[in-house]
Image (cartoon, rainbow, N blue to C red):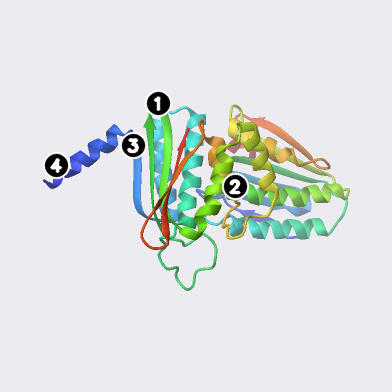
Amino acid sequence: MDRIQIPATDRSPAVDFDFSAGLLRISGESYPEDAAAFFGPLLQSLRAYLGQGGENAVTVEVALAYFNSSSAKALMNLFMALEDAAAEGRPVAIRWFYAEGDDTIQEAGEDFASDFSYGSFDLVTAPQAEEAHR
Amino acid sequence: MLAQDFLTFHEASRRGGVILSFGGDLSENVLFSLGEVLKLRMSQGETDASVAKRVFSIFVEQAQNIIRYSADKLPRPQDKAPGPSGLVSGGMIVVGVEEGRFFVVCGNEVPQADVPTLRSRLAHIVGLSSEELKRFYREKLRQAPDEGSLGGSIGLIEIARRSSAPVEYDFHDIAGDRCLFCLKAYI
């Protein structure tokens, strides 16, 4: 599948879904005008990728400094697709980066992590969450 | 007289601790610009980073509620796709500090028909402890959005979670089949 690379804007995150490497990354801030329009195509591509099956491990790195509630909902949809794939045997690992001391993002990671039982969901401190992918 | 009236208005809002106030047509672009100056004001005022984040988060959720659910909307251009982008909606949003605590208050018209649902959702949220709010948020996050929602149906829960006290809300009947809805959150 084609790699998806979207540069960050002031209010939407950078996206790098490198399907052939099994490495999917989202970083920056996320409160787009229309979260469903931004994340919808990403969810479709992710589902198509996971639907192809295979044994390759999937690693997802999320490093968001801020996201609104509509983005939270969209992220949950991505995570549910990943957890479903993990339940069917695909090795899935999510790495959730948050800046040390950033309780909001840490707690948000815990909210999402509570829904994972097949895939792994790890909270990772980064000195600066935004720096994690540079 | 003009300047005197304006000064009175300005001083009244300063006494009320207002640091940002907007009334009129709100769009996603206006939200973004107001959010930028709010962030700047808080960083220059040396607001604690975690408080500033919560203020910003509540501001965004409140402003997006106005944009999406205000009954006072400009007609949408024909060529615009459905969804929240391109919406222009009337409302008010004020950010200020009262006794050392930030607050964000919004006001917008809603259809009378929406009031019972909104009222019961708020009554439910206000009655929850922070632990119950967390559980409720996680539960709603997993569910499909409510009918008529343009977001995730979790904006109000998000506002309540980021607040340091229960949110205050009120409804006031206005002309026709509309009601003025106000929501105030303290951080």
**Amino acid type of the residue tagged 3 in the rendering:** Val
Residue ID for mark 4:
B4
**Secondary structure under badge 1?**
loop
**Amino acid type of the residue tagged 4 in the rendering:** Gln
**Amino acid type of the residue tagged 2 in the rendering:** Ile
- x and y, in percent, of residue B83 in the image: 54, 62
**Amino acid type of the residue tagged 1 in the rendering:** Gly
What's the chain of the residue with tag 3? B
Labelled disc at residue A68: none
What's the distance in space between the residues labelled 2 and 3, CA to CA?
27 Å
Does mark 2 fall on the same chain as mark 1? yes
Describe residue B138's horizontal placement relative to residue A70 as left or right.
right
What's the distance in space between the residues labelled 1 and 3, CA to CA?
12 Å
Q: Earlier in the sequence, mark 1 or mark 4?
A: 4
Describe residue A8's horizontal placement relative to residue B132 as left or right.
left
Q: Residues within 10 Å of mark 1 (few under 14, many from 20)?
A: few
* The quarter of the displayed image where residue B9 is located: top left
Residue at 77% over, 60% down: A48
Residue ID for mark 1:
B100
